[in-house]
Image: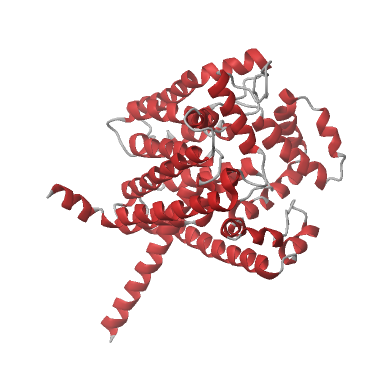
């Protein structure tokens, strides 16, 4: 009876899980059948090869290095979380496919977390099921779940951090101290997986004061929460930060945040100003972050122009052509590489430089994302002005999305949007709910008038 009751209560969520498993299974099989194990390595990045080399050395020599043979040079560019995850499966089978299987399992837990988080906020199954279903069936999400990259594990770790923070820090008054400790620890783990999130701790600290009231008890409570998040974060982060300081004289989690994130903005600003970008190669790694920040302060208008343009590729890059190419590899021959660096002169070529089926997938993908983003906007409006409860939570989500837009820059694409897709999908589900609710109310009003 209990089993029947559980299945009956959760039949639609179970259906979503079944569909998610089937779609990921089909995609996984298509990759293996058409490309073999190398199909799990994206064609436009060498990140997977680097992760694999790090995992291999982890498993075989217990060292964190990309060197192919001794002496092993310590790694600074990446953090150990994801390579360690791969190394667990490398010890069993020295191929990528087993790690990918477990990544798809982790994606299922992300679906569950999206459902639980949405139910926690709205107590409406339709909204929670729709948000979870979008994540379950969205093609590029499935694609990145099946690539040897940190996005799937990182998205889950960040989502778990957010769920814990929202439930036990923002909404709960009983377990907020435990929630703060766990949140700080989870954010630290998230950074071990991917260092792009090392500054996101600031967001958690700021929003830990979400319900602050001007009295001693409230002030003490919120300061305690913030301190516990920070202390927990740094206790878990200290070993790696100490390693970075001892070996490389820097407190960065990894050099990728400087050499990729900050240097990327410097590069784009130099291009827009017509300066010689080769000058950037002479900047020491440890100075790239501070140099970039100083340059942004000196040229705020140039930075603002580049940064505002970065919203478009982040929110509108779909990746559907890449997904289609998995099932029909000859499609790759029609790929038209069009990367927009933010120059208005290149915009025409970026939009109109497509033909044949590639053009259909390009414009079709953009149309789908435009519709979804509009629903997300409707969802934000509904949350703030109609639903009105927990309004600091959508603000937290919006700043989370903005953080990753800022970190990704103009060269953003669907992969870099993966960590914040769960929050975008919650907004989309809420927007759809509002539209259907409005249509239903309109029909009821028309019937009453007739």
Instruction: Locate residue 175 relative to residue 100 in the image: left or right.
Output: left
- The answer to whether residue 277 of the structure is visible from this angle is yes
Q: Position of residue 247 (x, y in %)?
A: 65, 14
Q: Quadrant of residue 68?
A: top right
Q: Quadrant of residue 222?
A: top left
Instruction: Locate residue 242 relative to residue 271 in the image: left or right.
Output: left
The foreground one among 2 and 401 is 2
Q: Quadrant of residue 172?
A: top left
Instruction: Locate residue 250 relative to residue 92 in the image: left or right.
Output: right
Write the residue at 42% across / 53% down. 136
191 up-or-down from 274: above or below: above
Q: Position of residue 124 (x, y in %)?
A: 30, 55
Write the residue at 69% across / 52% down. 309
- The answer to whether residue 219 of the structure is visible from this angle is no
Instruction: Locate residue 449 relative to residue 379 in the image: left or right.
Output: left
Total labels drawn: 0
Placement of the C terminus among the 4 image quadrants: bottom left
Q: Residue furthest bottom?
A: 450
62 up-or-down from 135: above or below: above
Q: Position of residue 165 (x, y in %)?
A: 39, 36
208 up-or-down from 232: above or below: below
Q: Residue furthest top?
A: 246
The foreground one among 142 and 115 is 142
Q: Residue furthest left?
A: 1
């Amino acid at each position: 009876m209990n089993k029947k009751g559980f299945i009956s209560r959760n039949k639609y969520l179970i259906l979503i899980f079944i569909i998610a498993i089937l779609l990921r299974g089909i995609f996984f099989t298509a990759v293996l059948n058409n490309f073999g194990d190398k199909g799990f390595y994206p064609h436009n990045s060498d990140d997977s090869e680097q992760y694999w080399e790090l995992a291999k050395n982890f498993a075989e020599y217990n060292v964190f290095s990309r060197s192919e043979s001794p002496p092993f040079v310590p790694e600074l560019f990446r953090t150990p979380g994801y390579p360690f995850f791969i190394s667990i499966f490398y010890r069993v089978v020295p191929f990528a496919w087993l790690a990918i299987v477990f990544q798809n399992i982790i994606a299922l837990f992300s679906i569950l977390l999206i459902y639980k988080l949405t139910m926690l906020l709205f107590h409406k199954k339709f909204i929670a099921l729709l948000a979870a279903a979008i994540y379950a069936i969205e093609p590029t999400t499935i694609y990145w779940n099946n690539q040897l990259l940190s996005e799937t594990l990182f998205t889950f770790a960040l989502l778990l951090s957010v769920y814990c923070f929202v439930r036990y820090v923002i909404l709960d008054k009983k377990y907020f101290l435990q929630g703060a400790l766990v949140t700080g620890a989870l954010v630290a783990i998230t950074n071990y997986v991917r260092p792009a999130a090392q500054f996101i701790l600031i967001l958690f600290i700021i929003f830990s004061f979400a319900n602050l009231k001007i009295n001693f008890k409230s002030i003490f409570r919120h300061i305690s929460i913030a301190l516990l998040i920070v202390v927990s974060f740094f206790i878990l982060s200290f070993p790696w930060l100490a390693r970075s300081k001892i070996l490389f004289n820097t407190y960065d989690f990894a050099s990728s945040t400087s050499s990729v994130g900050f240097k990327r903005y410097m590069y784009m600003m130099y291009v827009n100003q017509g300066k010689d970008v080769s000058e950037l190669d002479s900047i020491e790694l440890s100075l790239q972050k501070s140099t970039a920040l100083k340059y942004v302060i000196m040229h705020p208008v140039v930075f603002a122009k580049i940064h505002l343009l970065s919203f478009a590729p982040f929110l509108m890059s779909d990746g559907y052509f890449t997904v289609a190419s998995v099932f029909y590899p000859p499609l790759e021959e029609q790929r038209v590489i069009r990367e927009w660096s933010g120059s208005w002169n290149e915009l025409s070529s970026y939009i109109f430089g497509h033909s044949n089926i590639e053009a259909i997938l390009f414009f079709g993908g953009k149309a789908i994302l435009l519709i979804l983003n509009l629903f997300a906007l409707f969802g934000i409006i509904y949350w703030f002005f109609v639903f009105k409860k927990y309004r600091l939570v959508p603000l937290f989500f919006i700043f989370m999305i903005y953080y990753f837009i800022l970190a990704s820059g103009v060269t953003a694409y669907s992969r870099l949007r993966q960590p914040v897709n769960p929050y975008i999908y919650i907004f989309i589900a809420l927007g759809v709910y509002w539209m259907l609710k409005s249509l239903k109310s309109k029909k009821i009003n028309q019937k009453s008038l007739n």
